[in-house]
Amino acid sequence: MEKPGAYNTRPDLPDPVGIGLRHAHYADIPKERPDVGWLEVHPENYFGGGINRHHLEKSRELYEMSFHAVGLSLGSADGIDLDHLQKIKELIEIYQPFQFSDHASWSASGNAHLNDLLPLPYTEETLSKLCENVDRAQDYLGMQILVENPSTYIDFADNEMNEQNFMNEAAKRTGCKILLDINNIYVQAHNHGHDPYKYINDITPKYVGEMHLAGYTEQPVEDKTILIDTHSKPVHDPVWDLYAHAVGHIGETPTLIEWDEELPPLSTLVQEAHRARRVMTDVLRVAYAAE
């Protein structure tokens, strides 16, 4: 049975493309006021208060904001850390982000907290646990959350479904939305020999609430090259092509330029955002003309 999105609200953004607010650009954002629609922040960076909160407040005065968490461990068999969730809720109440997201992965078990977002086997058991944790998070926060498809470098032998069906089913059962990371789809398609366009086509459009674009790094391994989701490069051309296909399939969707390592000047992020805006506009113009 499909669960209705009890907190289902589609953001009303004048410009659908945003960039990440990162430490290197704290002073530049309010000074330059870049031509982007919104900013994304990792809420865990602001749990401690202090100067980081000051910069967050200054940027929030100028832009709509999305929270993209990395520490809820939504796929964990141990459930969600209530203390972590409480700190996120405090920030949500103060800064009123239009969206909140985390990942279909796990990063905590018992007293162990890992720095990596580890993949899940795509089985009914892990799907049920993910949905239980998503339901708990949505009920506690009082808002719909988005769940991001991960970047993966291994396939589990006991998978009972593919990733896109796993994501669709999670959205169907919980009323959450999918944060569709286009770079992650391309990276794992290359690494595992899958078809990234089929992945996009299999995603139910109404379940998608946001897209991410980022740059990968090529890593030679023996006689082949694998792609690593480093968020340290401009978006590569094959990912732009896949994004255009995704916009054609899903429609206008808030889109983030994600860049976390080897940060360039702010102007470079803005240029990438403008390219995403052009791609979306061009694809939708053609689609509307064909109707």
Image (cartoon, grey):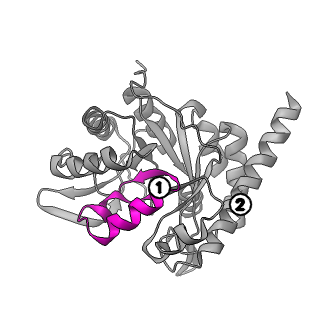
Q: Tell me, yes or no, whether the highlighted magenta stretch contains residue 198.
A: no
The structure residue drawn at horizontal position 53% and vertical position 58%, both measured from the top left corner, is: 184
Residue 201 figure quarter? top right
Residue of label 1: 61
Say whether disc 2 or disc 1 marks the residue closer to the N-terminus.
Answer: 1
**Where's residue 1, x and y in %?**
40, 18
Q: Tell me, yes or no, whether the highlighted magenta stretch contains residue 66.
A: yes
Which is nearer the eye, 34 or 19?
34
The structure residue drawn at horizontal position 45% and vertical position 59%, both measured from the top left corner, is: 152
Residue of label 2: 274
Quadrant location of the C terminus? top right
Q: Residues within 10 Å of mark 2 (few under 14, many from 20)?
A: some
Q: Residues within 10 Å of mark 1 (few under 14, many from 20)?
A: few
**Where's residue 202, x and y in %?**
59, 37
Which is nearer the eye, 82 or 248?
82
Which amino acid, mark 1?
Glu
Q: Nearer the viewer, mark 2 or mark 1?
A: 1
Answer whether residue 265 is visible to the viewer in this image. yes
- Give the extent of the magenta segment: 40-69
User: Gap between marks 2 and 1, in whole Å?
Assistant: 22 Å
Instruction: Tell me the SS state at disc 2.
Output: helix
